[in-house]
Image: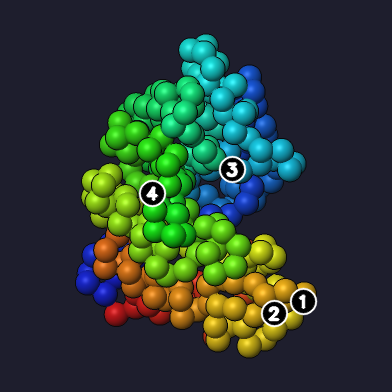
Amino acid sequence: MCICGNKLQVYKLFLKKKPFAIPTAEGGLLDLENPDTARALIRSAHDNGAKALLSVGGWSYNDTPLENVFMEATADEARLAFFVESILSMCQEYGFDGVDMDWEHPRVDGSSARQYEALMLALAEELHAQGKLLTAAVLSGATADGNVYYDAAAHTNAVLNALDFINVMAYDGGDGERHSSYSFAVDCGIYWREPRGLPAYKIVLGVPFYARPSWADYGTILVAAPDAYKGDLVTYNGMDVHYNGPDTIAQKTLYAVENLGGIMIWELTQDTTEADKSLLQAIGKAIAP
């Protein structure tokens, strides 16, 4: 979805919602669990001048990591071709405007980066020929300590050049305050802009709507601790949990608007319905004229 910022430029607001299209080792995709909901979301996006992309993958399915499934689905030319066709067919069936690939995550060691690159270049060729988008959820690029995240290099220059934009997962830097601080977000943006050389418009900063180490939704935390919106740290279920409150989300949004290409949310249903405490509303207020 595109929104206008206070400098009359267009910034991307990428709203992620579960579930994903789940790959199989043979190169197919499982049927979407809620096809009617998917179609309704696509209609709503199009009615509001926005695009809806099919997210493929995710970290796990039924508590089983999907990394090895991606490796098997791209292990040879035949399975790779079938995988690409499966993705294109689902896009066509539902009317998606493109694909957001969420292979978590290709690695520098072994054949992972090569297989990922082959998949992404094949998808880019087919999708762009149809006027559709190809994006990817990518590693933070930096660690919570400000160092380079080693496996970020598996997103090769050829892949980055083929993508319309990347969604930087600038969260899960660790438990506690390492989770997703403002400085961590800035370090992530700098990595993709400077050593990797991506233009600002292709870098979308991911922000979390959940806490660590509890993994609790921001909205759920507010039910237990109504004043939690005033900061980024609260005691929840007997433990100290760190998250991004409205002020930090607004600060990150301004950074993304001024230095990058937009904001990605993981994920929308984790927000509160209380407008004055909402993280989504904090994003809107930060970019409002």
Task: Measure the C-alpha gap from mark 4 to mark 3.
Answer: 23 Å
Task: Measure the C-alpha gap from mark 1 to mark 4.
Answer: 34 Å
Task: Measure the C-alpha gap from mark 2 to mark 1.
Answer: 6 Å
**What's the residue at 70%, 65% (across, down)?**
214
Q: As displayed, is residue 188 above or below residue 58?
A: below
Give the residue type at disc 3.
Gly
Q: Nearer the N terminus, badge 2 or badge 3?
A: 3
Q: Residues within 10 Å of mark 4 (few under 14, many from 20)?
A: some
Is 74 left, or right, of 193 in this rendering? Answer: right
**What's the residue at 33%, 43% (across, down)?**
164
Q: As displayed, is residue 249 above or below residue 111?
A: below
Name the mark nearer the viewer: 2 or 3: 2
Q: Nearer the N terminus, badge 1 or badge 4?
A: 4
- Are circles 2 and 1 on residues that touch, CB within 8 Å? yes
Q: Secondary structure at mark 2?
A: strand
Q: Secondary structure at mark 4?
A: loop
Residue linked to disc 2: 235
Task: Measure the C-alpha gap from mark 3 to mark 1.
Answer: 30 Å
Residue linked to disc 3: 58
Q: Secondary structure at mark 1?
A: loop
Q: As displayed, is residue 59 above or below residue 170?
A: above
**What's the residue at 22%, 72% (across, down)?**
7
Residue linked to disc 4: 148
Give the residue type at disc 4.
Val
